[in-house]
Amino acid sequence: MANLEAHLRVPGPTPLPDPVREAGAWQMVNHRGPEFAALMGRVVPALQRGFRTTGDVVLVGTSGTGGLEAAVVNHLSPGDPVLAVTVGAFGDRFARIASQYGADVTLLEVTWGRAAEPDAVRDAVAAMQAAGRSPRAVFLTHNETSTGITNPIGPLAAAVRSTAPEALLLVDAISGLGALPFDTDGWGLDVVITGSQKSWMVPPGLAMLSVSQRAWEASERATMPRFYFDLKAHRDAAQKGSTPWTPPVSVCFQLDVALGLIEREGYPAVFARHAACGAATRAGLRSLGFELFADPAHASNTVTAARVPADLDWKRFSADLRGRGLTLAGGQGALTGQVFRVGHLGYVTVNQILAALEILEEALAAAGRPVDRGAALAAAARAADRASAQIADPPMDASMSAAARADGTEVQA
């Protein structure tokens, strides 16, 4: 049986707060009855606040990848020109889904470890227009967990709007929404997809999508096949407080509880906490001698990728870490065996990051590598303090969670 006290530091699924774990054991209710309707009446408005949208938000019983597929098949037709801006493995996946359903996909491939640039996106859209293939949709990735970067979605969306205002903006926000500042309506996004097992502190099983009025209109014209993933069926059922198919009821219970915890902490505090955890992770890894993979200007506050040293046997080292109670993620796709990743999203505090760094330090020392004991923890704590102090929008104040502090104080649920 897995060690329940182990430090799970992968980019998802993420650890669960005790109240969320307990909610998973609640007795079933009729998913067509008043209890579930009341739950939907709480969850959907809470998600709208998290997405920062007044548009529809629908829940689909599936993984994040299922949410990406739903976004594709509801809004496109075979042969539609699509620009897929990909900065890593998950951007590639989004593009492959569209290609599988017959979309005419043009890739704008950004060097892994770097963010997309608005001018490059604008130029790619213009090139498609010049070729008589103005994009029906543009795919963007908010936070790329395979590389540890966060894209500047606001400027990227503005670049698309300035060149092809009719194009739909479909955004994979699976691993960033809920932990990083995000503004669906303010950025003019049409479809935004996230997943329960990431920043929302809930087990896998739910994809949540916001859909703009423009996107609903496009869905009426789209001809890609869909049945289970028909978002109109989900919207119509949601208006009755239900879902079109049997939902993962326990995961819905847990999402209801998790959203309450997040709103009690407050999104400004959640963002500050993740900024502190991200800064602590990066500083600690650098102090331990690891080279970070992502462009520092766009480093993610939910996951950090670091290069595996050429003289370090990652499989053996990873196994040693697991034996000490720390689980990290390896590289994906083209980065398999080249990087490892530390997740710091959802139910996470600086104190937990310091504990993970301490285990890393012990394992490095046991492997005979030079380590200045305690230096990484000190560097991480200083970086967390600086990150907390530098949060300017909104400013740190007394209402913000103590979990954003580097002293490790945790929020009590």
Image (cartoon, rainbow, N blue to C red):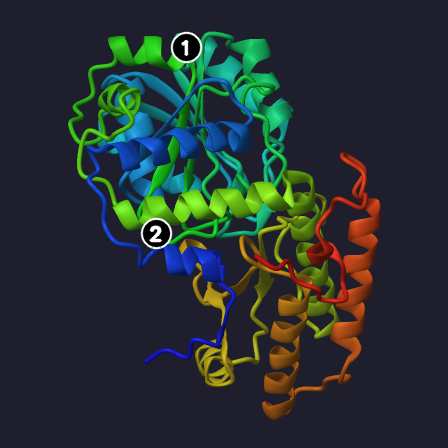
Label 2 sits on residue:
204
Q: Nearer the viewer, residue 270 or 282?
A: 270
Depth order, front residue of 352/18:
18
Q: Position of residue 118 (x, y in %)?
A: 62, 25
Residue drawn at x 35%, y 17% as measured from the top left? 81
Amino acid type assigned to the residue bearing label 1 in the image: Arg
Left or right: 87, with 158 as reference point: left
**Is residue 16 visible in this depiction of the protein?**
no
Rendering coords of residue 17 (x, y %): 49, 59
Residue 376 place in picture, x, y as percent: 75, 74
The answer, for residue 200, to whether it is visible in the render is: yes
Say which element carries label 1. helix
Q: Is residue 107 left or right of residue 158?
A: left
User: For the residue labelled by badge 2, is the local secondary structure a helix, a strand or a loop?
Assistant: loop
Task: Provide residue 244's location: percent of width, then percent of height.
Answer: 19, 29
Name the kind of residue labelled 2 in the image: Pro
**Rendered view: 138 above or below 129:** below
The mark closer to the camera, 2 or 1, is 2
Seen at 45% across and 19% down, the residue is: 190
- Depicted 250 relative to depicted 267: above or below: below
Q: Quadrant of residue 236?
A: top left
Which numbered disc covers residue 244? none
Residue 214: numbered disc: 1
